[in-house]
Each structure stands twice: as C-alpha cells, then as structure tokens.
Amino acid sequence: MERNRQDLVLGLVFFASIALLMWATIELTGLSFLGEPQQRRVWFRHASGLREGDNVFVLGHRLGSVASIRYNGAAQSADERIEVVLRLDQPIDVRDGYHIEIEPGSLLGGVQIQIDPGEGGPTLATEAPLRGAVRVGGLDAVGELFADDQLSTDLKSIASGVRELVDGLQRGEGTLGALFKDRSAFDDLTATLRSARNSLQAIEAGEGSLGRMIYSAELADDLSATVAHARSVAADIDEGDGVLARLVGDAELGARMDRIVTQVEGVTSGLDEGRGAIGALLREEAVAADVRRISSGFADVADNLNDPSKGMLGDLIAGGETRQRFQSIVADFSDMSGTIREGRGLIGKLIYDEELPEQFSRMMNQISRAIEDAREAAPIGTFFQVVSGAF
C-alpha cells in the first residue's frame, strides 16, 4: 500500500514536470495553438530598449511578441527609423484611430508594446505599415524633467529662496524668526495656546454662553421645542391653515397678489414716466417749482402767525391785544356757563329748575283750555250778530 502511494506521487511529479516544460517551451518560443500567427510592421522614432521576444499586448491581453527589430538608416522621416515586426498569435483588425505604444514593462525594467486597435473606423490592410509612439518611463521622465533648463533654473531659485528663509529664521527675522529667537514671542504664543486650552476646557465644562449652547441640556430642550414648533408651523402651512398657508397654497390669492404687484408696477411706471399729478410732481420741474412756491407761502404764513404785528391771526396766536380780548370773551362765556349751571337767571332756571317745567306745562294747559272755550263760544256769538243785524 505504501509503495503504491509512492508510485502515485512519483507519477504526479513526472507529469507536472512535463506540463511545466511544455508551458515554458510555448512561452519562450512563442508557439501558439490559437491559429495562424499574423505579422504586422510598425515604425517607431526609437526603440527605447525594446528587444526581440518582448511581449505584445492588445488592450491589456498578451497576444504575441516582438519578432524582429531593425534600424532603417535610409528612412526619410524621423518617425520611421526603427522598424519593428510583431508576431501576433491571432489576427487582429487594426482600424483608423489605432494607437500603438512602447511602454515600461514593470518597475524592475523592461519594455513591452501595447496596442489599441481602434473602433468604428475602416479596417486597415494587413500589409499597411503602422506608426507607434514611445511612452517615457519613470526614470526617463525624471531625467527629461531635470534636463529642462527652465526647470533647473526654477529649482535653483526655489533652493535659493529656501536658503534665504532659513537664514532669516536663524537671524530672528519675521514672525517665525521671532518665535525661534525671541523668548518673549515664544512665551506670548505659549500663553495664547494656554488661554485657548482653558477656553476649550470651560466650553467642555458648559461654562459661558458658548459652553451652554453646546452642552446645556436645557438649551438643547429649548432648541428642540423651537424646532418642533417650526415643524408644526410648517405642517399647518402644508395643511392650508392660516394666512401664510393661504399665501403659499391658495392659487386665487396668489393671482390677486400678482395682480396687485402688476398694478403697483403700472403705478410706479406711470410715476417714472411723469403721468398724473404725483408723476408730474416727480418729473415736471414747473410743478416742482409750484410746490416749492406753495411751501414757501405756507412758511411765510407760519412766520406771520408767529408775529403779533402781522394781521389779526398773528395778533391772536402770538399774544397781542386781539388775543387778550378773545381770552376775555372766553372768560365771560365761562362765567356765563357757570351761572347757567348754578341755575341762576332765566336760562339757568329754564335748564336746571325742576318746578319751572311743571309751571310751564300748567300754563300751556290753561292756554289750551281757553282756546277751546273760545272756539266753542264762537257759534253763539255769530248767531247774535246775525240776529242783531237783521233788526
């Protein structure tokens, strides 16, 4: 049993070795079972370290290798001095808008060719020469970057500025220099930081207005109540309660407001154009001059009213003889009204004497009876006059 297990392990190792050998042979020789290999010729400006056997990728998928590299000294264009023949494991359709590029293979070195065959355009013939580009690697890019004279000048200028900054700090120039050299400035900064720390500790302890705003439960409850009230108001507005809700949701009221705004705009436009009395007042200089004259006349009248020598009203208001007479008349009327209220005199008795109305009523009754008696005696007197006249 043990021997059979050893034979099984030995067989597995043997077949695995054969499979590994076959895979290495395919990878190193470029052998492909996918179909007839295809060769495409590509021109480059330079090879950038490309070697025969380097990998060729199509959209990130390894699909062949470099078959040959040749320098073309008779090339009429600098872009055609390096001729590279690619061996592809399966045919690909290269279209207008393709892109072929030599790019770094890895950070450890080496290069490879990356192909984007393009899409949407017409397919190019298999024998049509293709042109590629070279992507600069990391170290090459750094070399080209430092080879730039302008960049070198800028770097030197930056280094010089940094050196001057460091020298200024060492001499104690500027704010940072003062912090490095002046002890008092450092102490002030330390005191400021300490004060800021104390303020933060007071805020965390809930002291002061800011501390209460952040840590006070009562203030948080008040804020929650305010938010709840605002939410209730918003709900009332959504439900259509109140004037504000009508302003927001009532289409008829909105139309009225729109008409009012339109009318106000029309009025202001008319005023701006000088229409109407107010528009003329705002725009017409003659109307404005008339208003100024009227205002000046009122001012003159007011001045005259304050001057006792300017007419009767001025004498009355400013305290002249007319005013004294008027005050005397008012005093007499006051005395008269006091006398009437006391019930003195005929008018006072007529208004305030309770017996006089009864006497007046009895007198009117007597007059009324006398008139009735005279009216009843009138036929008898007429009869005697007729009889006496007949004889």
Image (cartoon, rainbow, N blue to C red):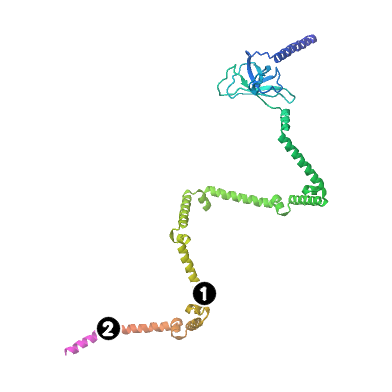
Assess disc 1: are there few (<14), some (14-19) or many (≥20) residues with their C-alpha within 10 Å of its C-alpha: few
* Residue 63 in view: no
Q: Position of residue 263 (x, y in %)?
A: 45, 54
Q: Is 62 colored magenta in this rendering?
A: no
Residue type, numbered disc 1: Asp
Query: Which is closer to the viewer, label 1 or label 2?
Result: 1
Secondary element at tag 1: helix
Please name whichever residue, 213 or 377, is drawn nearer the observer in this view of the structure. Answer: 213
Q: Which of the numbered marks, if any, corresponds to residue 376? A: 2
Assess disc 2: are there few (<14), some (14-19) or many (≥20) residues with their C-alpha within 10 Å of its C-alpha: few
Residue type, numbered disc 2: Glu
What range of the chain is rendered magenta?
372-391
Residue located at (46% from left, 81% from top): 352
The answer to whether 128 is drawn above or below residue 329 in the figure is above
Q: Position of residue 368 (x, y in %)?
A: 33, 82
Q: Quadrant of the C terminus?
A: bottom left
Q: Position of residue 377 (x, y in %)?
A: 26, 85
* 186 sits to left or right of 119: right
The answer to whether 77 is drawn above or below residue 327 in the figure is above
Q: Which residue is mark 1?
A: 303
Residue located at (48% from left, 60% from top): 282
Please name whichever residue, 308 or 12, is drawn nearer the observer in this view of the structure. Answer: 308
